[in-house]
Amino acid sequence: MDKVGLVSNIQRYSLHDGPGIRTTVFMMGCPLRCAWCSNPEALKKEKQLMIFDQKCTLCEECVRVEPEAITIEGKLKVNRALIHDIDLLAQSCPYDVFEIIGKEMSVEMLIEECMKDEPFYRNSKGGVTFSGGDPIMQSDFLLDVTRRLKEEGIHVALDTSGGLPWDHWKELAFEVDLILYDLKFHDEEKHVQYIQSGNAVIFENLDHLSKLGKELIVRMIIVPGVNDQLEDMRLRCERLKQSGANVSLIELLPYHTLGKGKYIRLGLPYPLNQRVEEYESNVENLLELIKSQGFTVQTRNP
Ligand code: SF4
């Protein structure tokens, strides 16, 4: 039977998620909880409800389907814990106040969507990138999708935190052409503080990827005052070298707060507020340090 995956978004004509022009498929679910996550809608492997309450006209149609969860007293008030059916609720509003994030797609459906952009892949030496959330949360589904894409000769990249044990995604890692790999801290205590889990499994997976010989682009979001210390970066570089991983590039990405509005629409607190203007202050030193460790490095806007 055709497997089903849960997709949060499909972004076409991506230029930063691997070589050439790419289609980036964002999957639902992530094993980590980074304080600076800009895709909070994709953290859980289940459908999510976003509420755009400024679109509300107070027409009360939604109260008919969710009378316990919704009250209209001069403004829309939603008690998320009392909602019975987010799909019905979303359908009830004529003004698109409610948006469901997470679309169930079969392997065939996703292949069809990806292959619409095949001419762009061929002309630009691009392909498909699976991102998220973290795509390895749905590795079983993506293994089938990847094998089909590879049969069509399409380049496939995997954008992962590496936060799940190797057994969960080793077959998928074997099939893809390129891995975009996040390294957030060398310091485990800080990793626990800001990511809510340790980083031992992430470094272990690096060793496994090294044995596979997979090409890696290592990506690091740099959060001023949190993970931009030179010593931690030096240790991350040392660990990368020690693993023997086939790192073709290190990319530094500046922290941004563009995802903040999503937290409000999901009813979640925003976990981190750092002063983004400080980013420039340490980035030149980080670039120099990474170069001195023998890596090719670049920085770019998100
Ligand atoms: S149905 Fe939509 S517009 Fe009408 S009250 Fe509910 S949220 Fe507001």
Image: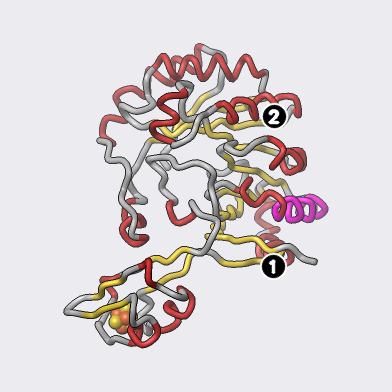
Task: Answer left or right for 3 relative to 242.
Answer: right
Quarter of the rendering occupied by the N terminus: bottom right
Which picture quadrant has residue 167? top right
In the image, is residue 143 part of the stretch drawn in magenta?
yes
The residue carrying mark 2 is 209
Q: Amino acid at mark 1?
A: Met
Task: Answer left or right for 187 relative to 11.
Answer: left
Rendered location of residue 277, percent (x, y)? 26, 34
Give how far apart the Cα atoms at labels 1 and 2 are: 30 Å
Dot placed on the residue nearer the N-terminal end, 1 or 2: 1
Which picture quadrant has residue 76? bottom left
Q: Quadrant of ligand 1?
A: bottom left
Q: Main secondary structure of the magenta part?
A: helix
Q: How many marks?
A: 2
Q: Amino acid at mark 2?
A: Leu
Say few, some or many: other residues with alpha carbon within 10 Å of mark 1 (under 14 / 14 to 19 / 20 or more): some
Look at discs 1 and 2 and give the one toward the viewer. Answer: 2
Say few, some or many: other residues with alpha carbon within 10 Å of mark 2 (under 14 / 14 to 19 / 20 or more): many
Vertical placement of residue 235 versus 252, above or below: above
Cβ atoms under marks 1 and 2 closer than 8 Å: no
Quarter of the rendering occupied by the C terminus: top left
Rendered location of residue 205, percent (x, y)? 65, 30
Q: Which residues are magenta?
A: 141-152
Disc 2, SS:
helix
Q: Residue at x 70, y 52 (%)?
A: 142
In the image, is residue 281 part of the stretch drawn in magenta?
no
The residue carrying mark 1 is 109
Vertical placement of residue 291 versus 205, above or below: above
Rendered location of residue 140, percent (x, y)? 72, 51
Residue furthest left as drawn: 74
Foreground residue among 22 and 52: 52
